[in-house]
Image (cartoon, helix red, strand yellow):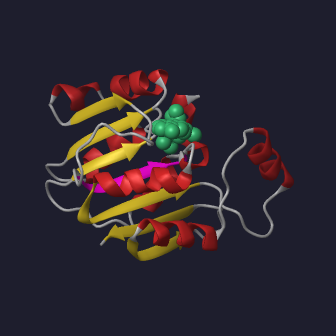
Amino acid sequence: MLERMNDSHGPMTQWALSHLQFNKGDRVLDIGCGGGACLARLSTIVENGSFVGIDYAKTSVEATQQFNQALIDAGKLEVFEASVSDMPFKDGEFDKIVTVESYYFWPDFETDMQEVYRVLKSGGHFLLIAEVYDHEGLPQSVLDNIKAYDMRNLNLDGFVNVFEKTGFADIAIHVKSGKRWIAVEGVKA
Ligand SMILES: C[S@@+](CC[C@H](N)C(=O)[O-])C[C@H]1O[C@@H](n2cnc3c(N)ncnc32)[C@H](O)[C@@H]1O
C-alpha cells in the first residue's frame, strides 16, 4: 500500500509543492512520510537541503528509509518513528514543514497543529496537502470511505479557523481545479 501511495500521490504532491518557495539549505520536515516519495521529491527540489521524515508507523519509517537509502547514506535524511503530537525536535528547527494525506488521522488536530507550529522556524512555511476536503458534491463512495476510516474532513473555513487559531499568518488555500486536491499554507509569525 505504501508503494502504491508513493505512485498515486505523486502528481498531487508535485502540484502542491510548487506553491512553496524553497531556499538553498532549507531544513524540511515531512510529517506522516509513508513510503518516502515526498522526501525523495523534496531532495530534488531543495538545493543543499536537509530532510527529516516522521511517521508513527514502524512500517512507514522502514519503507521511507529503504526508498531513500542513498539520501540517508549521504547524511541528508533522517527518519524517526514518532507521532505528530509529540515530535522529537527543538523549537524552531525547520524552515519548511509539509504533510501529505496524513492530517485526517492525527489524534487532536488543534493541539497537533500547535506542535507543528512549535518546531517551525519564525517565518517558516507549513503546507498541508490533502486529496479530499469537505465541499459540495463529494461522491458517496468518498463519503463512505471517510466514515469507514473515521477520517477528519475539514471544509475551507475549518482549515482557516484552525490555522488562525494556531497563530499562522498569510494563510493561503490552493485548490486544484478538476480535482479534489487542496494545499493549505501558513507562515509562522
Ligand atoms: C495515507 S498515508 C500518506 C503517506 C504519505 N504522506 C503519502 O502521501 O504517500 C498517511 C500516513 O500518515 C501517518 N500518520 C497517521 N497518523 C500519524 C500521526 N499521528 N503521527 C505521525 N504519522 C501519522 C500514517 O502512518 C501514514 O504513513
Residue toward you, 19 or 121:
121
Judged left or right of residue 117, residue 34 is: right
**Is residue 140 left or right of 77 when viewed as pictured?**
right
Task: Work out whether 155 lies above or below 103.
Answer: below
Quadrant housing the C terminus: bottom left
Q: Is residue 154 left or right of residue 125?
A: right
Residue 127 falls in image quadrant: bottom left
Question: Picture coordinates of residue 171 (x, y %)?
Answer: 44, 75
* Residue lying at 14% horizontally and 58% vertically, measured from the top left: 24
Q: Residue at x 23, y 55 (%)?
A: 92
Q: Position of residue 84 (x, y in %)?
A: 44, 42
Observer-nearest of 11 and 187: 187
Q: Main secondary structure of the magenta part?
A: strand
In magenta segment, residue 96: yes
Question: Is 162 drawn above or below residue 28 in the view shown?
Answer: below
Say whether residue 6 is visible. Answer: no
Q: Position of residue 13 (x, y in %)?
A: 46, 53
On screen, residue 156 above or below 3: below
Q: Is 129 left or right of 71, judged from the image as shown?
A: right
Q: Which residues are magenta?
A: 94-101
